[in-house]
Image (cartoon, coloured by chain):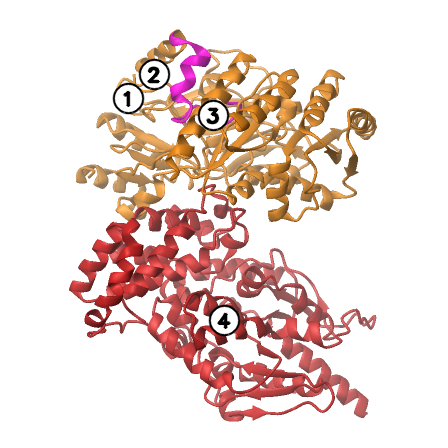
Chain colours: A red, B orange
Amino acid sequence: MTNIKKLAQLVKELEDQFVVCIRCGMCQSVCPLFEQTKKEADVARGKLALLDGLMNRMFSNPEGASERLNRCLLCGSCASNCPSGVNVLEIFIKARIILTEYKGLSRTKKIIFRNILSKPKTFNRLMKWAGHFQGIFTKKNKNSQGTSCARLISPLLSNRNFMPVATEPFHEHLPKLDTVSSRSRLKVAFFTGCLIDKIFPKIAKDCIDVFHYHDIGVFIPENQGCCGIPALASGDLKTFEQLVEHHVDLFENNSFDYLITACATCTSTIKKLWPAIYKGNQNRVQNFVEHLSEKTLDINQFLVANIKIDSSHTDGDTDKEIVTYHDPCHLKKSLGIFKEPRQILNASGIKLIEMESPDKCCGMGGSFNLFHYDISSKIGTLKYESIVKTSCKTVATGCPACMMQISDMLAKNKSNINVKHPIELYANNLKSKEGLDKD
Amino acid sequence: MIDHFLVDEFENIVGLPYVLTDIEDMVTYSYDAAVLDPVTPLAAIMPGNSEELGQIIKICNENNLPLTIRGAGTNLSGGTIPSATGIVILTSRLNSIIEINKQDMYAVVQPGVVTATLSEAVEKKGLFYPPDPGSQAVSTLGGNIAENAGGLRGLKYGVTKDYVMGLEFFDAAGRHIKTGSKTVKCATGYNLSGLMVGSEGTLGVIDKIILKLLPLPSHRKSMVAVFNNMEQASETVAAIIANRIIPATLEILDNFTIRAVEAFSNAGLPVDAAALLLIEVDGHPAVVQEDGEKIETLCRKLGAVNIKIAANDQERDKIWAARRSALSALAKLKPTLVLEDVTVPRSRIPDMVKALQQIAKDFKIDIGTFGHAGDGNLHPTILTDKRDVKEWKRVEMAIEAIFEKALAMDGTLSGEHGTGLAKLPFLEKEVGKATIAFSQQLRKALDPNKILNPGKVTGIF
């Protein structure tokens, strides 16, 4: 699919999406990056203007545009605060793809692409032509600069020296699973995700225990991989599509009610970006991706909607562990999920105390943290400060990437606050109750 | 291209990271929120203190380099669109609240402080800074002063000009000028603050601001009155004022706007209402109670079919948040949005509303109308697509028609958005040739090298 036709189609889609921004500037009030740098190129309005104004020039100096586009956490704070409803994340992702694909093109292709783009109104016609040129231009595919999932993780570990890779990743502990429930008839497929598999396997184990406790059938196919977001965020469409298609093959032949992940980023990628990128393709993959998107749920959301969770339960026990909750951007801003994790926490025998601005981005932003560690840390320090003010013993959050960032910030400040996924606290509570019952 | 020696000089003053010249960055300072063509500047500079600001201006003056000051860039009349041969000075790093004085009730701020940031800070101390332009979450106080920004509370509390006690600013030559003081009264020298307010960066560069603060009203009551037609609602507005009641806020929304706002905010606005009045009274509890009741009675008498009173702060905040989203929510409907801010004497609001409806019909265009009806300031918002050449022609004619109507009613072209570039061609109609010549003369005298935001307000001189 990496070809001129796809690029031209993406550019055209972008042009239609640009128009929606009226330059009101309200995104400045919520952008965590703008708060630090005060540069218009760092906030959504500036980036949209840049893309809009430089659509042609972008290709004479793709590095300049690319560098600015990549200075973004992809947290979606702007989009969720945009009264005009600009689909910021989709636009930025597409623009990153266009630039990366373009940079990977041969010289001849670049010239043709540049010429196509310099006359945006003739796209429709040219797109037809592009179909004919495709064969010539895809012969020498130089698209090789995209990062992979594994490459995202390893530099993080070597650079940051925190959260060691688990000695036994989840997929070694439990390579595959296919169980049915005895009573509930409910069956879920579980998408592990790289970070949970390799760094936080306990979260996955706890998920399986919770499914088991609630008598839910589970399907885990062997050989799962990355949801593709690191590749996509670097504009590497080819790797992204390979990953999506790999998972389509894995999940297509089993029947289940929901696809569950415990990673906010995986959930929002599968739910929103998979269909967005495949939109208009009209083939088997596109169909299944749409279908899967509808079935995909965050674990907190799934439990609250399908299992009777008693979150009103209070023991009057004042010695309960104080927990505060950080809203991952990909749960709250992308998917509007913020009540459910709190309901799960309230059902976990802890005392939830809210921090100031719990939905403020932690500054991780995936690869943003790799390339802009100084700004990422400044944003993370603000999060650290609000966490500490709650006097909590544990900070919970539904995203392993946020867990890494928050752990880094806490470690840096020599804090002894624990970082947990809500499901770990929930599972822990179930286990301790069972223990009590046995006594 | 900007001369390299100038870039070096600027870098020496503010430091390397604070001088931007890449085309990719320049594009991001080429626009504001007005529907006008972008103009890319040569450089953008972010001074970190007064001294740096003064030195930059001096260099600009010595080199005939035009400069445009930019706060948040939320201007609706093109006042922050720079000159193609000039630079942009960003006030974003000049953003400290220097002092909030509880005893004497004033605040001293730098120009880059965000309006809402100051409001929140003074409210924490039981004080009140009333001007609240729609963009207050991002707009800067320097920008508010340069534009004489208004807001929702203009009716009772006035606009930005009513709160400026004193200013420090740089003139075109980079000299530091002081005017006004921290005292309630001050009669020394010319009232240069009055001249600077609304000057849109054409007479000087604001460096420090002394703002008047009020005690925070102890009680507030917000209500939404629902009407079956726009005339009844606008007549109610005129009647409230005629009955000597001054609410803090008295806003009108037509059906078009109601639907757009509700779709975005889910504030529970009745989407089938023809018009809504959003009203807030504040002050002493007895006054709030009495005024509230009087307004309710008036509304019902003049045709309100339903009146909903906010039960708590949360409901109140929801109403005003919904109102604040009106502009952007309307923007969702069509690719191009032209927001006007014609203002008429308050008793003429019903006439103006009628005129707007007629203009929409005559020119076959969509006009959503909302605004600060209580102070006579309406926001007829034209929804169109600039790419539709025929419709755009009709839009331009409709705008002229709106202006003519407003002027015929002794109104003004702009209540709060400023002249900038957008209103420039029409200014003469309102103020006459001599006024423009006088203003140009003033500029010539104060800015002989024509570096201060050239082309704005008075045009080229």
Circle 3 — which element?
Answer: helix
What is the CA distance from the residue labelled 2 to the residue labelled 3?
A: 32 Å
* Residue that badge 3 annotates: B398
Is A92 on the left-hand or right-hand side of A269? left
Is A265 on the left-hand or right-hand side of B449? right
- Height in image: A39 above or below B232? below
Q: How many marks?
A: 4
- First reached walking from the N terminus: tag 3 or tag 1: 3
Residue type beneath disc 4: Ala
What is the CA distance from the residue labelled 3 to the residue labelled 1?
A: 34 Å
Look at the image and give the residue range highlighted in magenta.
B413-433
Quadrant of the rendering where the N terminus of chain A is positioned = bottom left
The residue marked by circle 2 belongs to what chain? B
* Residue that badge 2 annotates: B443
Image-quadrant location for residue A12: bottom left
* Residue that badge 1 annotates: B450
What is the CA distance from the residue labelled 3 to the residue labelled 4?
A: 53 Å
Whole-percent x and y of residue A439? 81, 92
* Residue that badge 4 annotates: A401
- First reached walking from the N terminus: tag 2 or tag 3: 3
Q: Do marks 4 and 2 both belong to one polypeptide chain? A: no
Q: Do marks 2 and 3 both belong to one polypeptide chain? A: yes
The residue marked by circle 4 belongs to what chain? A
Residue type beneath disc 2: Arg
What is the CA distance from the residue labelled 4 to the residue labelled 2?
A: 56 Å
Residue type beneath disc 3: Ala
Q: Most extreme residue toward the left, as rendered?
A: A108
